Image (cartoon, rainbow, N blue to C red):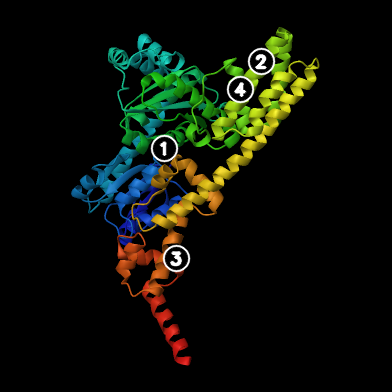
Amino acid sequence: MYSIMLVDDEQDIRQSIIELVQWEKMGFQIIGEASNGEEALEVMESNVPDILITDIKMPIMDGIELSKRVRDENPSVKIEFLSGYEDFEYAVSGIKLTILEYLLKPVSISDLENMLRKVRRKLDEEKRSANDLVTIEKDFLKKFDVSKMSFLISLITDNYSDVSESEFKKLLQTYQLNLTGERQVLLNITIDKSSFSKSTIGNQNLELTKFSLTNIVRKIVDKYVQSEVFTFTSNSVVILSDTKENIEMYTDILVKEINESVQKIFGFSIGIGVSEEYVRISDTKRAFQSSVSALNYQTALGGDKGIYISDIETVQQNEIVFDEVNEAKLVSLIKIGSKDELETFIDHLFQRFYSGMNSQEHLKIFLMELYVSVLKAYKTTISKYDSDMLQQVEVISEIHHYQDNQVIKEWFKNFCLSTIAIIQEQRKKKTDSLAKQSYDYLAEHYSDPSLSLKQVSKQMLISPSYFSSLFKKENGLSFTDALVKIRMEKAKEHLLTTDHKIFEIAIDSGYTDQHYFSYCFKKYFGESPNKIRKTFKKNKLLVETKS
């Protein structure tokens, strides 16, 4: 059963459609209706539909703006337009939306039911094709020959720093790869094993499911940007390669749509590690490593939204000094702050060391490698080294002379635990600072009608999804609610202290439409701008008369 929301400013049209269409018989259910985009978004905060049927021309917020907002927040929702042909052409020009169908007004019930049947077939086929693992496997093998796959895997595993850009371009042409954009971002997608085992397809072949997942991801990504999508070990890897503008505009949307679509189609959760942006294709290995680091945070941070490495770490991960797997885990445990697991892992490291190497010189090198790794974890979250951290070098130069291995191990544990405490304290300060800076930014730029969560998150140098959760957690209000609050309070202040006309106050408050401003003002304060101004002047006059 697919869920539907109906949005049209004409109540009789909405009512007729709801009453006359045989929804359940056709495999649909109406979960909400609204008279404009603003109302629709409010309903969708608690109940997101599979399909949105909307008019284009509506007051307060039209179907175009609604579709843009839905695309940004819930990109897996399919959109159908009910409107004139010219309006439809206007709506889709310049924006990428998941438009399934559109109908010209006036709408007949038979035409609408025919359209719904087509939509149902498309959605059913989408699910069928996603789970037709035999066909998916054949399709996968057709699209990627062995040599091309080998080269893609080498991009994320081998070092190409000595290869010139011109040589790289030749290689990309040889393998006909869509990696010629000015900016790249790498997505590393892994299936949550626990969620997979509990899903309806948990008894199916996991390896074939990976092929199916990769195919779904490819179809989603292809709608937005140039890319290459392939499977590596247990994961699906996506290299986005497009213009700087497209990478910035669609990366967050892609991450959300992939998460939502996988949950809807397969019924299990995934983790998505998102690398930093990079320019040179030869840096793909480093980007892959940073995406792995991002996935390491998935368990600690929770949720099924993508984890952006740039949200967690302020600098790029350096080259690994000692054992790659062990150092990566040590660094990850320190940054996450998992104390019990960290102590157990340190026990494992020292046990492994003492069972294989016993010389004092080897011990000194081993401790120095561990120390440098801790500094890396520290530096990725804090821009400057603490003086106490640097003084530990002197301790290392002396402690390796101790004969008691237990003392040395306990010193290193305490060093790691103190580092965790410093990181957590600094991270809290950074979070508080970002939240305050972003709120101050709203208070300063509230009059800009184009002000958006994406715009402010870009100013704060973090991803929109991470910024959204951080802002609400620290400020107690969602970004939208905070912006409305600031705009309304400023508008009321101008209303009561100036003689400006309502349309002037609306513009000064960031609203281009006076009617929409008045609607928001009354919704916020319970009275219209004119009524509040008249009441204020009347009370002021009474006070002045008495005095």
Q: Amino acid at mark 1?
A: Asp
Compared with 422, 366 (above or below) is above
Q: Residues within 10 Å of mark 4 (few under 14, many from 20)?
A: some
Q: Position of residue 153 (x, y in %)?
A: 42, 15
Judge whether residue 51 can be spotted in this image.
no
Q: CA distance from mark 2 to mark 4?
A: 10 Å
Q: Are marks 1 and 4 in contact (CB under 8 Å)?
A: no
Q: Amino acid at mark 2?
A: Phe
Q: Sequence order check: which comes first, mark 2 or mark 3?
A: 2
Q: Residues within 10 Å of mark 1 (few under 14, many from 20)?
A: many
Compared with 286, 34 (above or below) is below
Q: Amino acid at mark 4?
A: Val
Q: Sequence order check: which comes first, mark 2 or mark 4?
A: 2
Circle 1 sits on which residue?
A: 252
Which-is-in-front pick, marks 1 and 4?
4
Q: Report the disc number at residue 366.
A: 2
Q: Secondary structure at mark 3?
A: helix
